[in-house]
Amino acid sequence: MRIDQRSMPVLSDLPILDGVEDKTNILVVDDRPDKLLALQTILEELNQNIVIAHSGEEALKCVLEQEFAVILLDVNMPGMDGLETAAYIRKRQRTAHTPIIFVTAYADEMHTAQGYSLGAVDYILAPVVPDIMRTKVKVFVQLHRMTRQMQRQAAQRVALAREQAARAAAEESTSRFRFLVALSDLLDQSLDLQARVRGLVRFVVPQLADVAALVLFSEGGHVLRTELAYMDPHADAEPHSLTVEQVLDTRVSEAVQQVLTGKPEVFDEPGGARTSLALKRLERSEPEVLNLGFSVSTLGGFPLRARGRTQGVLLLALREGRRFDANAWSFANAAATRGAVMIDNSLLYEKVCEADARKNEFLAMLAHELRNPMAPIRNAVAILRSPKVGEPQRGWGLDVVDRQVQQLVRLVDDLLDVSRITSGKIQLKLQPVQVAEVVTAAIETSRPLIESLRHDLRVQIAGDPLWIDGDFARLTQVLANLLNNAAKYTEPGGCIVIALERCGGDAVVRVTDTGIGIRPESLATIFELFAQVDRTLDRTQGGLGVGLTLVQRLVELHAGSVQASSGGPGRGSEFIVRLPLRAGTTASESSEPVAKGSLGGGCRVLLVDDNADSAQTMAALLRMEGHVTEVVYDGESALQRAQAMAPDAVLVDIGLPGMNGFQVARELRARPQTRAALLIAVTGYGQPTDRQRAMEAGFDHHLVKPVDLDAVHGLLVTRQKREV
């Protein structure tokens, strides 16, 4: 099939615009130079680039290097003929659609069909008619140039679209940046949590929503507060804000729970378009209805996540006819993300302020608790110094001093216990323990306080013995602390119940009272350090706010748990301790206390302490027990006196002036006269590292001040037994 010149009058009449763009390439392929010259002469009038190829191979090389508007291809060529050359040209993607015109001296039907199957657009018989040749080639040149022009225009449109998209993205980024800067500036005005929550919901109304609600949750999952902001169509342009306890709307509650999973969501027509919201205000029992003045049809929810936790949900409601577009949705997400960080900072700031306040209150309580025993001690000492004091008054004064010193020791021991537990340095002395015996010991410890307040103590212990692996002294301390708290925070004449039962694989101890109770918001922090149930109570009851912290940490060290519950203020409280039962049941070995008094003669004891009062009083007490004592006040004197005395035991204060207690112990161990003596370190430092240093220096025992006389006497008697 040939293209008739008359079928393309329009394209053939179109002028080729010289100088407007680069010339196009026309490839002429023929093995005969005379035919190439003739074709080149005919096509020169088109004023295009004529490229000559003398073979099929040369033609293929040309199409690899250049782009052509049309290819004039001789059919009969030696080697690779025109048909084979056309087949290779069509296989290449870039030239698959390049027009090919076969030029041949003869064209039978078979060759013509094969040529068209290879993509030929026409056949021209030789000898060619110049005008027909030029017209046909001109058509394809013009088509090629028009195609290139459309490609350039398409590329320009793509570049323009990209430029517009980049400009829009830049404008959106700038707008987003300004939006976040404005939000940050607003929220940075105060660290107060309420101010930031209110500022956030007021900021997004009305530019992102017609109604905004922020629901904030505690770490336990309870709603802390809900802040609302909305536009009143009948009032001024400023949004109204409102703090409520809860929004009483099932669809809103469902949306909040769904968004808490961590992904933003859109909820269309939440329960149908509405013009009002039911609310429950703070400290009000009756719900209220908030009339919005417009219909809400779309609700968007955004999680407020910070530090890996969803702290709340930001809800944005739109009136009918308003929808979230991509820009508004992006801005709302950004506001929720930035707001979550700022709110989290406020929560952390609240915790820091609360901890600082508790610390200050603790220091004030500590000063109070330390001064309380000092006053009766000073008064008792003044009475004991009076020459007119009788024997009954002397005994009473001594009892006062003893009780108040014990109170001071308990306070210091509690603080040291908290320090050791917090730093992970406490060591439990685990052994088989019958829980009922622990309960009995704790009751005996707390009974004086309970009886002084006239409480009714009821004990309920299960019939079967319950055995655990535990530290008897520490577990007694746990239950005694709970009983003491129950006694202190129950009005005189109240009721306290301590019950022991088995629950599954645990021994469960419940301490219940009819006292002042615990507020719900205080239950989450009741076991924190320095926390107090009610700081307005009479401080003569004592306490530093460390008892429940000790209870929790000690129970956890026993692989157990403790929890507190209360019906609220004035409704009492209950503490439940769970301890895992041991696999087998064996009786614990009881150790008999060392009897007071000496075996035969007493020991020769050398006391080394730069505190004269401490050394002299301890020496006097040991002499009353039958021991021979001498006192020195520094390390050098101790070494000199020990060489002459050859003591059975030496009590050495670690913090001596000059030569310290560790150095004294090493010297005593190096000398023959004292190498076998019982060396006891006496110090105010009671950490495990201090004990280890004492053992490494050569001490046999490490006692923490104030030293218990029975403990020292027991060590001396044990020494005598071993020698006997």
Image: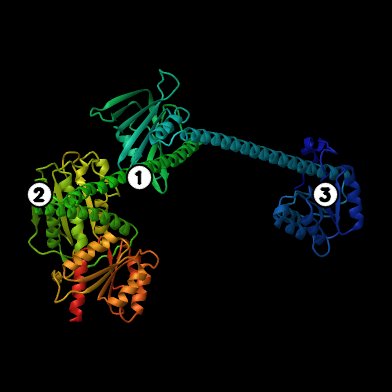
Q: Residue furthest top?
A: 234
Instruction: Say which amino acid is labelled 1.
Output: Ala
Characterize the local packing of mark 3: few (<14), some (14-19) or many (20 or more) Cα atoms within 10 angstroms: many
Task: Please state which of residues 421 and 669 is positioned toward the viewer in this rendering.
Answer: 669
Percent across and percent down for residue 200 are 43, 33
Tell me how far mark 1 sits from mark 2, CA to CA.
35 Å
For the residues labelled 1 and 2, say whether their Cβ atoms are less than 8 Å apart: no
Q: Nearer the viewer, mark 2 or mark 3?
A: 2
Q: Residue at x 25, y 53 (%)?
A: 411
Percent across and percent down for residue 10 are 78, 35
Quarter holding residue 719: bottom left
Disc 3 element: strand
Disc 2 element: helix
Residue marked by disc 3? 26
Residue marked by disc 1? 355
Task: Please state which of residues 653 and 484 is positioned toward the viewer in this rendering.
Answer: 653
Instruction: Say which amino acid is labelled 2.
Output: Glu
When the figure is inspected, residue 259 is found, relative to residue 575, above or below; the finding is above
Disc 1 element: helix
Residue marked by disc 2? 451
Quarter holding residue 47: top right
